[in-house]
Amino acid sequence: MSQQYDPAQQLPPSGWYPDPVDTTQERFWDGSNWTTRQRPLASEAQYGPPSAAQPWSGGGSQAGVQAPYQQTGYQQTGYQQAGYQPTDYQQAGYQQADYQMQGYSQYQPQGFGPSTADGVPLSGWWRRVGATVLDTLILAVLIGLATIPFIDTLTVGMEAWMNDLVLAAQTGAQVPSYTDAKYGLRGPLITIYVISEAIGIIYSTAMLVWKSATVGQLAAGIRVVPKDQGMTQRPLPFGTALLRNVAYYALSAITITGLINVLFPLWNRRRQTLHDMIARTQVVKVR
């Protein structure tokens, strides 16, 4: 016989129940809301609290069981009396108004397009490209300002190398290398490269720790979150942000790996780049 709804008890106790969105998974109910913790649906599972004496505990698992209130005997009307409506995002413990107040335009349930495990839509590839272009322009200005002291040395060295290059073309002599020590270019170029990489890592890491997004990402309406935690409003942890950006610049140092990295979201079902996979992050849409 079904357990009757008791207004004094309101909701089922915490425990593992069939996921209301993905019938191949179980999701942990904390007693008031669905959490982001999931595990594969077991063939024989005891739902609810572990105690055998617990009257809320259900029997074995059954694919398609919709929510804890049904598994534990609540009738739909009783669940609605407790203040819940039987829609996906509300079964998952979210209220639409709360979700929108957090900066998201709409809830996208799992299975209705690429999204995190807790249902937040993932960014498209072109949004990420647009954000990267804007960030590149910002970095170009910052790097240009930081490398002003090297402009005179570079100008003199480049003029000397170009003159020798033209002379070699006219006489058939060996083409000179701009890395030859007599031009004085090698040291400044290495220094500028190191400064550029450092500014890029510092800028991106600081923005992710502060806003979970760079200026370009904020303008594109996207942000970086830990993998499958799209609902989190906490900034990205420093270690995660630093690892993500160091991985990005390391991969970009080689042309082929850099190209594969930026194209990877086009065929990856989680829309992750290689540096996302290394840092266990995803990029989600916030508007």
Image (tube, rainbow, N blue to C red):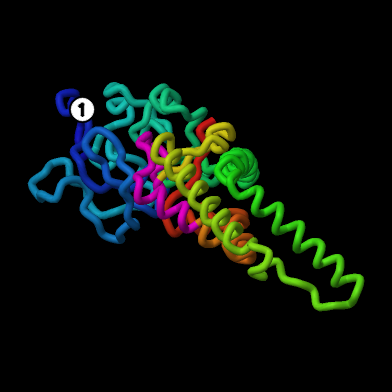
Q: Is residue 65 magenta?
A: no
Q: Position of residue 231 (x, y in %)?
A: 39, 37
Q: Nearer the viewer, residue 250 or 71?
A: 250
Q: Is residue 7 above or below residue 201?
A: above
Tag 1: residue type?
Answer: Gln
Q: Residue at point 64% right, 42% down?
A: 133
- Secondary structure, mark 1, is loop
Which residue in the protein does label 1 denote? Answer: 10
* Residue 271 visible in rendering: no
Q: Position of residue 106 (x, y in %)?
A: 50, 30
Of the 4 image quadrants, the one containing the C terminus is top right
Q: Nearer the viewer, residue 112 or 73?
A: 112
- Is 93 placed left or right of 131 in the picture? left
Q: Is residue 239 above or below residue 139?
A: below
Q: Residue at point 19% right, 23% down?
A: 7
* Residue 40 visible in rendering: yes
Q: Residue at point 38% right, 50% down?
A: 240
Q: Is residue 87 above or below residue 152?
A: above
Q: Is residue 227 magenta?
A: yes
- Toward the left, the furthest residue is 53
Q: Which residues are magenta?
A: 226-247
